[in-house]
Amino acid sequence: MSLLKEPDLGTPAKPGPATVTVEVDGHPVAVPEGTSVMRAAALSGIDIPKLCATDSLEAFGSCRLCLVEIDGRRGTPASCTTPVTQGMKVTTQSPKLEKLRQGVMELYISDHPLDCLTCSANGDCELQDMSGVVGLRQVRYGYDGENHLDEKTDSSNPYFDFEASKCIACSRCVRACGEVQGTFALTIEGRGFGSKVSAGGTDFMSSECVSCGACVQACPTATLQEKSVVQLGMPTRSVVTTCAYCGVGCSFKAELRGAELVRMVPYKDGGANEGHSCVKGRFAFGYATHPDRVLTPMVRESITDEWRPVDWETAISYTASKLKDIQTRHGVGAIGGITSSRTTNEEVYVVQKMIRAAFGNNNVDTCARVCHSPTGYGLKQTFGTSAGTQDFRSVAKSDVIMVIGANPTDGHPVFASRMKRRLREGAKLIVVDPRRIDLVRSPHIEAAHHLQLAPGTNVAVVNAMAHVVLTEGLVDRSFVDERCEDFDAWAEFIARPENSPEAVEELTGVPAEELRAAARLYATGGNGAIYYGLGVTEHSQGSTMVMGMANLAMATGNIGRDGVGVNPLRGQNNVQGSCDMGSFPHELPGYRHVSDDVVRGVFENMWGSTLLPEPGLRIPNMFDAAIEGTFRAIFVQGEDIAQSDPNTKHVHAALAAMELVVVQDLFLNETAKFAHVFLPGTSFLEKDGTFTNAERRINRVRPVMAPKTGKHEWEIVAEIAQAMGYPMRYDQPSQIMDEIAALTPTFAGVSFDKLDKLGSVQWPCNDNAPEGTPIMHMDGFVRGKGRFVQTPFVPTRERSTRKFPLILTTGRILSQYNVGAQTRRTGNVAWHPEDVLEIHPHDAEVRGINDGDEVTLASRVGATSLRAVFSDRMPVGVVYTTFHHPVTGANVVTTENSDWATNCPEYKVTAVQVGLKNPPATADVASSEHRLPAMAD
Amino acid sequence: MTTHTGMSPQVRLANEIAVHFHHQPPEQAATAIAEHIRAFWDPRMRTELLQRAESEPDALDPRALAAARLLTG
Ligand code: SF4
Ligand code: SF4
Ligand code: SF4
Ligand code: FES
């Protein structure tokens, strides 16, 4: 495809029907009320010259280039700021307008370096274009007067430069940072001729800037420019694809020059992101071509041997024969595998098919086990299906937004920008989190309530909120009567005095009055929407909490329309998809239990093999069984379980106990240290398939380059299955999707052709909803009636003790991604060179710890060391860290505790002690220390 | 196998499930726990649980024990 240039209509679209008709240069056009003259003209095919306007931003009216004449009106109004009125007649070209526009351009150019031919934006510069458009032929003012040509370039950001001498002070960047991104890092300093863009009086890197790139995209000149464009030149072709980092699932134009990827530009037609992105998706793609990537298959007999590079045929037959041999000796159930949420739906599907049909067992699980498995259980029990209820767009209609155990500005930045926009418009915010996340107080946003609960007490808080709703008569009776069941028993339970805010205040640390006020706001403030993350699921009561939130939403009628809902913010790009694709040991694709004879029959027919009606092992069960000796081999697709799973010591022992560990990944990760076969994987730039984001949106992932390894991942898996004697063959990934559609009612209408035509669809997509389903449970719940489930609060067994008096909770930050294998191999390390331990100054002081000291962090299962940073974001008694760097080995300290229903690990609550690493002789610190060796990968 | 908590994983997991059904009358709870285990546990884990229910019934929460007995049926 050649370079895809999306049209810029100058000002944003206005909602509503096209009821206002105007004439532009004699061409009639009908547009919605409130549309600007500029946009109406563009829609009728006439581009009015412009510099300060672009359709991602509200009109500003500063450059005066877009002047027009309007019949019956005096003067020459700016078309970007003038709304249309019925019957308006607009003239966009006249000698008078031409002269005015040339005058404007002349002033701009007289203060602009005329190095067009050597400028990095040559050919992609609106100033250059406009000079041509307005017919500028001479500049009467020389450079002798005052000018900005000597302004210094700010190169502090690793990904883009700010070449101030080229700035025309149009303030598009300033407005993009505010309106689109919501960070407000930039301002225009000074006035008139002296005005210039400033990143808060410092350079970009030291400012509030989060490097989303919205300003770079908005800049009409080369002032804000990607470094990659400066180095490599302007791209010449584009491929539309999907970001492979987080569950927002942003669409991008991958822009290339020849075979080289120059930049990623967020795609305006992307349903999830509508032209916005974050630092990871836009800039951090360098890992895909990093020299650390392994491109050749490798095998070894023992994990103490050196790796031996082999060809694909050898690697595949070695793997297959080993797997079969182990099954012969130890039984069919002695092997299994783990699918990855980073790979495509098609790649996940073939792995679970290989396990069920070729391995002949159900020992398949997915890394979603350790993040969102409670979402699957909880939403299925209450609503009938395991998925968020809304599309992202829905948040624009919310009046009260409740964010529970999620940190969207860091974890789901592009969705956070949408949310922040709505909050700035006046929606109310309730944050339920032990930590004061950025959202609680950020530019133009202040949470109405921050319920700063003790880690592990979510269920007590949500029950108390429901108690308030019920006992204060705030239940939406007609919704409940019409749409739900089991309400009375639940009401009896939730009304019990032990669920009152006053009764749980001491336990949760949330003042009863504050909790009551938050509950009233959610119940009565208009459309109430719940967004939640791993702070909900990664607890021993994760599933209970998901059901508790569902109860609360049903009781207040906040389900089944725009602006409301219960929405998991999924971590990895394809968590939703990997779950949909039958990655859980008890479920076939489409969340259907393996014991269902009819469903199994359909699969058996299509796959031509007999399937087991019993669930297989989950990840933690696999580890336990490995140590017991009944589970001997594992196929690990794109996941670093040795680092990301809890209780590292236990996981390492389990991996070391196995006869065969097969790792399919980009890099030799921690898990590969225990592997006997390494099958090099493909990056998202090489993949051909689909990802499904947190709003159930199925997006195409299109190959930007051929697989650097010579084989697609799905091909390798199919060949292993074949080598084991099970016929599995596809020529194209589209055939895999066709098979998924044929077997899965919620995907029945999905095909690559449809995705190419519509851009994306949200499942369910079938005969009832041929173009997909943005909002679920509109006319009834998937399970028929929404079910109220009683959710008693059972505290975790993990308690602070005299030996381990603090509670550790974990999280993530914007610039890094999970275990960091990708982001650590990009310029993003500039923001997060190491994991640190956030500790309250009070907790630090009593331990003799100073800001920046190296400390040991110990739990009952292990210890690690890292640097302490003072922070009052958590209450006294709670410490916090991230897990992006293997050297920290944060999971060395996390325990085997898990969600009762799904075994999702309890990452969010671990009793720990913190002490100085090199203490003065008298200090009391945890004794044992286990530090992972630095990774060589 | 025992973990460092000194308990077989199956016993620990069954007990963890059981606490979440303490609000229900014992029989109802036992049925719900048994259903849960049948739906989510690999057969070898169920076998192990049944063995533990025989050999060390005291290690199991009474509701989990009742559930284990239902699973044999
Ligand atoms: S990169 Fe994003 S956050 Fe930084 S200044 Fe530009 S718009 Fe603002
Ligand atoms: S940096 Fe670019 S977008 Fe910002 S004011 Fe200057 S020219 Fe306009
Ligand atoms: S928000 Fe998520 S999907 Fe979008 S660009 Fe950032 S990491 Fe990628
Ligand atoms: S484009 Fe309208 S004033 Fe700048």
Image: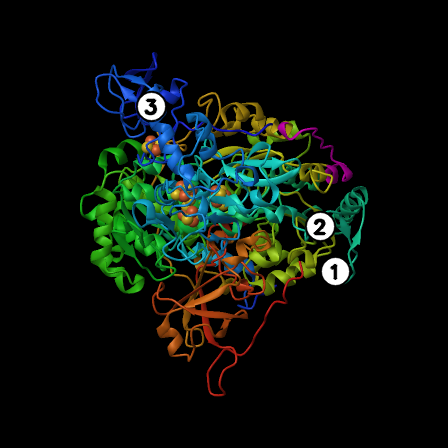
| Quarter of the image with the C terminus of chain A in it | bottom right
Q: Residue furthest left?
A: A472
Mark linked to residue A294? 2
Quadrant of the image for the N terminus of chain A?
A: top right
Residue receiving disc 1: A303
The answer to which of A635 and A811 lies nearer the viewer is A811
Residue at the image position 41 percent from the left and 30 percent from the top: A774
Quick check: do tags 3 and 1 share a chain? Answer: yes
Give the labeled residue for mark 3.
A97
Residue A577 visible in the shown view: yes
Q: Name the mark nearer the viewer: 3 or 1.
A: 3
Q: Amino acid at mark 3?
A: Leu
Q: Is residue A492 left or right of residue A538?
A: left
Name the N-terminal-most of marks 3 and 1. Answer: 3
Q: Secondary structure at mark 3?
A: helix
Check if mark 3's residue and mark 2's residue have beta carbons within 8 Å: no
Tell whether position A148 is magenta: no
Residue span colored magenta: A719-734
What amino acid is labelled 1 in the image? Ile
**Amino acid on which disc 2 is placed:** Val
Mark 3 to mark 1 CA distance (whole Å) = 76 Å
The location of residue A820, given as percent across then percent down, is 56, 55
Do tags 3 and 2 sit on the same chain? yes
